[in-house]
């Protein structure tokens, strides 16, 4: 089997299993471990996988692949919980906010449910709606649209149209990657127009992402960095990167 055929099969196996060992791949493809290691090195350079001790996992920013929600939810979990506390902490009583689809923004919603501030929360994510629904202090508005289980949220024409007709104080925006040259990127294209309408709707745009998404590629271009007011991330961020964001007028919040 050629490298190109192994590449496609490798990606499918990783999507199904989440993690694969070099030894198992060697037996599966009937090639040497060194051949598998070379294949993995090429895939890592392409941004599709991350090598780990003895094997590989699918890159959570990989091109064009929607990673199953549960796998994304469990990655960088502690850092996402930190971001959730910071994000909820900057929401003020009386504000209107948009909460985008995303496992990190789900953590913000969980903290808002605990804090019970008087806010209007607007979302296209069904799991976020489930967290905030029924809390007397929170007026919840759900956008509707075409539901996709992989992201637990809605996109498509109806969601795009909805967000083009509202104005809010804050947007908490998710992404697949963020880069000083490439801007804000997303792992799929079907959410792009919804997210762009969210950005237009908000006075203040707050990007949330764990530190490993900085400088990492993702499939679709979403927006240049100059739309951002605040970037919330984890404590793994390097000081030089914080400085670069601040030079661009973007406040960085992290624990």
Image (spheres, helix red, strand yellow):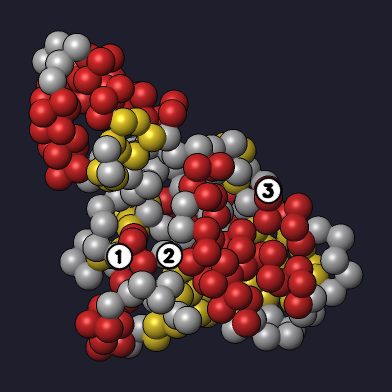
Q: Quadrant of residue 140?
A: bottom right
Q: Is residue 122 above or below residue 137?
A: above
Q: Are marks 1 and 3 in contact (CB under 8 Å)?
A: no
Q: Residue at x 60, y 75 (%)?
A: 85
Disc sitting over residue 126 in the figure: 3
Circle 2 residues within 10 Å: few <14, some 14–19, many ≥20: many
Can residue 166 be seen in the rendering of this structure?
no
Q: Quadrant of residue 20?
A: top left
Circle 1 residues within 10 Å: few <14, some 14–19, many ≥20: some
Q: Residue at x 28, y 36 (%)?
A: 55
Q: Counting residues from the N terminus, which is met first, the one under dot 2 or under dot 3?
A: 3
The quadrant of the rendering that contains the N terminus is: top left
Rendering coords of residue 41 (x, y %): 14, 39
Q: Residue at x 33, y 74 (%)?
A: 237
Left or right of residue 96, residue 5 in this image: left
Looking at the image, is mark 1 or mark 3 nearer the viewer? 1
Disc sitting over residue 214 in the figure: 1
Q: Are marks 2 and 3 in contact (CB under 8 Å)?
A: no
Residue at mark 2 to residue at mark 3: CA–CA distance: 20 Å
Residue at mark 1 to residue at mark 3: CA–CA distance: 27 Å
Q: Are marks 2 and 1 in contact (CB under 8 Å)?
A: yes
Rendering coords of residue 83 (x, y %): 52, 71
Rendering coords of residue 122 (x, y %): 67, 63
Looking at the image, is mark 2 or mark 3 nearer the viewer? 2
Q: Residue at x 13, y 20 (%)?
A: 32
- Name the residue tied to disc 2: 209
Q: Counting residues from the N terminus, which is met first, the one under dot 1 or under dot 3?
A: 3
Name the element at disc 2.
Answer: loop
Q: Is residue 32 above or below residue 104?
A: above
Name the element at disc 3.
Answer: helix
Residue at mark 2 to residue at mark 1: CA–CA distance: 8 Å
Residue 247 versus residue 55: which sits nearer the camera?
55
């Amino acid at each position: 089997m050629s490298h190109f055929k192994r590449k496609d099969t490798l990606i499918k196996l990783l999507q199904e299993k989440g993690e694969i060992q070099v030894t198992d791949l060697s037996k599966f493809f009937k090639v040497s471990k060194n051949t598998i290691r070379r294949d993995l090195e090429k895939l890592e350079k392409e941004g599709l996988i991350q090598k780990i001790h003895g094997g590989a996992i699918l890159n959570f920013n990989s091109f064009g692949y929607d990673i199953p929600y549960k796998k994304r939810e469990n990655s960088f979990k502690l850092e996402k919980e930190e971001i959730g506390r910071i994000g909820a902490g900057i929401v003020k009583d009386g504000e209107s906010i948009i909460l985008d689809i995303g496992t990190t923004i789900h953590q913000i919603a969980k903290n808002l449910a605990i804090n019970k501030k008087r806010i209007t929360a607007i979302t296209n994510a069904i799991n976020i709606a489930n967290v905030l629904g029924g809390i007397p202090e929170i007026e919840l508005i759900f956008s509707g649209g075409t539901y996709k289980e992989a992201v637990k949220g809605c996109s498509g024409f109806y969601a795009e149209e909805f967000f083009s007709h509202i104005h809010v104080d804050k947007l908490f925006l998710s992404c697949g990657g963020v880069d000083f040259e490439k801007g804000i990127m997303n792992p799929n294209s079907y959410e792009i127009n919804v997210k762009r309408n969210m950005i237009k709707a908000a006075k203040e745009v707050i990007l949330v992402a764990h530190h490993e998404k900085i400088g990492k590629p993702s499939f679709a271009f979403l927006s240049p960095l100059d739309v951002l007011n605040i970037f919330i991330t984890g404590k793994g961020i390097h000081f030089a990167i914080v400085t670069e964001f601040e030079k661009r007028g973007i406040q960085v919040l992290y624990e």
